[in-house]
Image (spheres, grey):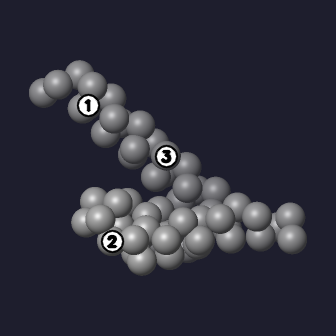
């Protein structure tokens, strides 16, 4: 297995666990929508995921 691929996978899993711990299930769903939208090149899906993540991160500040 390529070292760069392994490092990217570990980093993605760590970020996913952080998002789930910090923002709960809604943050994890937003991250999933964003990743899925990028993977299948769906602008609508990735935009929904990005908006959900942005709302989760700025929610307490508003």
Residue 42's label in the rendered image is: 2
Q: In which quadrant will I find the N terminus? A: top left
Q: Is residue 48 left or right of residue 9?
A: right
In percent of the image, x 49 and y 71: which residue is there?
A: 47
Between the residue at mark 2 and the residue at mark 3, the CA separation in whole angstroms equals: 22 Å
Between the residue at mark 1 and the residue at mark 2, the CA separation in whole angstroms equals: 26 Å
Residue 15's label in the rendered image is: 3
9, above or below 22, in the image: above
Numbered disc 1: secondary structure: helix
- Examine the image and state in which quarter residue 58 appears: bottom right
Please provide percent x and percent y for residue 37: 35, 67
Circle 1 residue: 6
Can residue 29 be seen here? The reply is yes
15, above or below 34, in the image: above
Can residue 24 be seen here? The reply is no
Residue 25's label in the rendered image is: none
Numbered disc 2: secondary structure: loop
Of residues 8 and 43, the one nearer the viewer is 43
In percent of the image, x 39 and y 71: which residue is there?
A: 43
- Examine the image and state in which quarter residue 40 appears: bottom left
Please provide percent x and percent y for residue 9: 31, 39
Between the residue at mark 3 and the residue at mark 1, the CA separation in whole angstroms equals: 14 Å
């Amino acid at each position: 297995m390529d070292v760069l691929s392994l490092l990217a996978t570990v980093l993605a899993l760590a970020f996913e666990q952080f998002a789930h711990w910090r923002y709960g299930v809604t943050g994890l769903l937003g991250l999933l929508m964003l990743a899925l939208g990028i993977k299948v090149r769906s602008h609508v899906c990735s935009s929904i995921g990005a908006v959900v993540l942005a709302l989760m991160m700025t929610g307490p500040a508003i």
